[in-house]
């Protein structure tokens, strides 16, 4: 049948020129990127962004994307009259004229970025096609994360002021009004901005909040008045500081009162807000756990303690995989993500895919193992209904029945150091087991020196131990965690190993699950925060505690 649609010649020819997407990266939280921003990043050939913005967007860019470095130029070093804008515009247009898809990412929203506006005009003048993907503006997103609503049911006016460029007329108009003022400034210029508003007519007792590093886990907010903000920052030992140049958002008006922030500061009230948590697992293993920790306000830091290598003699694994295809097995049982990965790699080596599992029953221990199988296109037939372990799998595994089971053999791809519990249990149920070494586990290389120093020096607020081997290997490659660090263990056996290494265990998971362990640590953090508030003490992270303070182990 011949096609009835328009011919390719009916469409205008596309220009060989590329396209530029001006993209708003938001205030700092990568989770605030829009769906359209993620789509644009995934198809970009070139990504142009300052370092802080690059950290936010890079995770959504495709592998191999070019990220040319922009020089960091401030107002005191632009004596040659060549600002960052010009460098960025040249990079963007050069790449676009070469037929490449360019994403120019800026903080906040590109519509409120003067440099981005000038770069858009430069593209227009050069005939370079471009589009704009809006982002959440800093002046809107940061107050929302600080628990400072900008409007209420009365619908008061909101005025946005950039203190760097505000004219005397601007300060006068805001000063004589009763509008909520959202002031973009720097930490060391907050007091001067407050003085401008007071001089223009605002009362010195007008409340204001000042938020630094908004929407990130480094966020910190101070509540004061226009007349007291300088004193508050000095008493908090925030100023003077070499970080005084860092940008802040100040909200001036009744909506920034302390009483409201006590009720609405949802972000900074998370149970582990700002905690730096060591996760001794690979990035792939720790992905969902790290996401869960971030939901509690923590900053996860993955440190692999175990490296996975192929078996020394691959012939046994090769025979077993071929046996899957020829119908040698009734079952295959996966006890780890690494086992799924090892079998999948063999499949790909032989040009096989998930269809080779047709007619074979598949068992999996743990939700992450099951998810890895589903990602491979295989839905497990059996996952333990109770404890996610070899013992839990045996509780649900059916005994061999020669009437209903045409084949009596199980393929068990595992690590070289796996225990014999599962093999012995399956044999007792009447099954023949091919216990195959699918991969070897070896101690990982030591982490970078700064990570080792943070572990030993108390730079981490907590560490999660998910097995006895993670305890032994972390201590072996990086040293023993400092005594101010909260130690959380997945079960009694792991806790015993930690104590044998001289560690005080503070948190014990009620179930052998990494997610229950994270929940238990979050509950510990919440109890600790509530206790500080009840005592009238400031809420601090464990790494900020006085060394030697004792804590009791908790479970949930």
Image (spheres, rainbow, N blue to C red):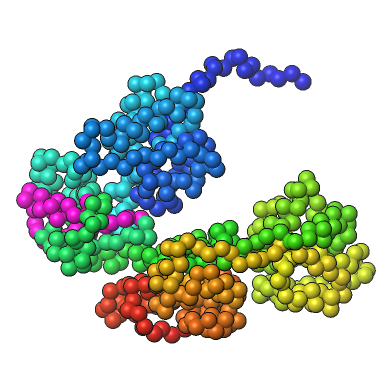
State the residue at coordinates (81%, 64%): 411
Query: Is residue 296 at least partly visible in the picture?
Result: no
**Nearest to the observer: residue 103 or residue 65:** 65
State the residue at coordinates (45%, 63%): 449
**Is residue 21 positioned above or below 442 on the image?**
above
State the residue at coordinates (12%, 45%): 171
Magenta span of residues = 186-215
Percent x, y for residue 144? 32, 55
Q: Quadrant location of residue 365?
A: bottom right
Percent x, y for residue 115? 30, 35
**Nearest to the observer: residue 287 or residue 497:** 497
Percent x, y for residue 52? 37, 48
Percent x, y for residue 78? 23, 37
**Is residue 182 positioned above or below 115 on the image?**
below
State the residue at coordinates (53%, 69%): 477
**Is residue 54 positioned above or below 256 on the image?**
above
Residue 267 among those drawn in magenta: no
For this view, does 403 lie left or right of residue 303? right
**Nearest to the observer: residue 231 or residue 520:** 231
The number of numbered discs placed on residues in the rendered structure image is 0
For this view, does 537 lie left or right of residue 349? left
Residue 190 among those drawn in magenta: yes
Quadrant of image for the N terminus: top right
Q: Quadrant location of residue 73?
A: top left
Query: Is residue 161 at least partly visible in the picture?
Result: yes
**Nearest to the observer: residue 186 or residue 516:** 186
Q: Report the residue that reaches farthest toward the top.
A: 9
Q: Report the residue that reaches farthest toward the right.
A: 403
């Amino acid at each position: 049948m011949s096609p009835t649609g328009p011919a390719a010649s009916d469409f205008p020819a596309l220009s060989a020129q590329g396209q530029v997407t001006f993209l708003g990266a938001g205030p700092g939280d990568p989770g605030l990127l829009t769906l359209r921003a993620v789509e644009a990043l995934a198809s970009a050939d070139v990504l142009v962004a300052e370092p802080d913005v690059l950290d936010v967007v890079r995770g959504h860019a495709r592998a191999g994307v070019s990220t040319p470095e922009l020089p960091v130029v401030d107002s005191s070093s632009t004596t040659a009259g060549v600002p960052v804008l010009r460098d960025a515009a040249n990079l963007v247009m050069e790449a676009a004229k070469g037929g490449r898809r360019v994403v120019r990412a800026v903080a906040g929203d590109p519509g409120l970025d003067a440099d981005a506006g000038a770069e858009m005009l430069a593209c227009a003048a050069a005939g370079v096609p471009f589009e704009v993907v809006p982002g959440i503006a800093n002046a809107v997103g940061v107050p929302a994360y600080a628990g400072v609503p900008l409007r209420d049911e009365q619908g008061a006016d909101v005025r946005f002021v950039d203190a760097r460029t505000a004219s005397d007329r601007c300060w006068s108009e805001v000063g004589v009004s009763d509008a909520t003022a959202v002031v973009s400034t720097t930490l060391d210029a907050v007091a001067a901005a407050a003085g401008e508003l007071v001089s223009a007519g605002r009362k010195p007792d007008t409340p204001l909040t000042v938020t630094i590093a908004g929407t990130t886990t480094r966020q910190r907010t101070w509540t004061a008045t226009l007349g007291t903000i300088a004193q508050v920052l000095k008493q908090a030992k925030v100023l003077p500081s070499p970080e005084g140049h860092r940008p802040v958002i100040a909200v001036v008006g009744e909506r920034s009162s302390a009483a409201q922030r006590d009720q609405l500061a949802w972000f900074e009230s998370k149970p582990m807000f700002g905690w730096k948590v060591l996760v001794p697992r690979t990035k792939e293993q720790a992905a969902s756990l790290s996401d869960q920790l971030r939901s509690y306000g923590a900053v996860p830091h993955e440190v692999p303690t175990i490296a996975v290598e192929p078996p020394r003699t691959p012939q046994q694994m090769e025979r077993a995989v071929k046996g899957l295809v020829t119908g040698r097995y009734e079952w295959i049982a996966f006890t780890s993500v690494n086992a799924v990965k090892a079998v999948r790699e063999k499949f790909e080596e032989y040009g096989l895919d998930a269809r080779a599992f047709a007619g074979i029953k598949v068992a999996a221990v743990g939700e992450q193992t099951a998810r890895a199988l589903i990602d491979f296109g295989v839905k497990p037939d059996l996952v333990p209904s109770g404890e996610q372990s070899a013992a839990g799998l045996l509780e649900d595994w059916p005994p061999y029945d020669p009437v209903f089971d045409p084949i009596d053999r199980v393929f068990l791809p595992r690590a070289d150091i796996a225990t014999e519990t599962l093999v012995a249990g399956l044999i007792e149920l009447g099954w023949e087991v091919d216990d195959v070494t699918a991969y070897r586990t070896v101690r990982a290389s030591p982490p970078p020196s700064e990570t080792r120093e943070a572990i030993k020096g108390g730079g981490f607020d907590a560490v999660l131990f998910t097995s006895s081997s993670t305890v032994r290997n972390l201590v072996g490659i990086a040293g023993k965690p400092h005594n101010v660090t909260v130690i959380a263990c997945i079960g009694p056996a792991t806790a015993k190993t930690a104590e044998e290494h001289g560690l005080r265990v503070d948190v014990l998971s009620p179930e052998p699950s990494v997610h229950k362990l994270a929940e238990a640590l979050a509950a510990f953090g919440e109890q600790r925060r509530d206790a500080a508030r009840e005592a009238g003490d400031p809420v601090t992270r464990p790494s900020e505690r006085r060394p030697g303070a004792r804590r009791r182990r908790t479970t949930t």
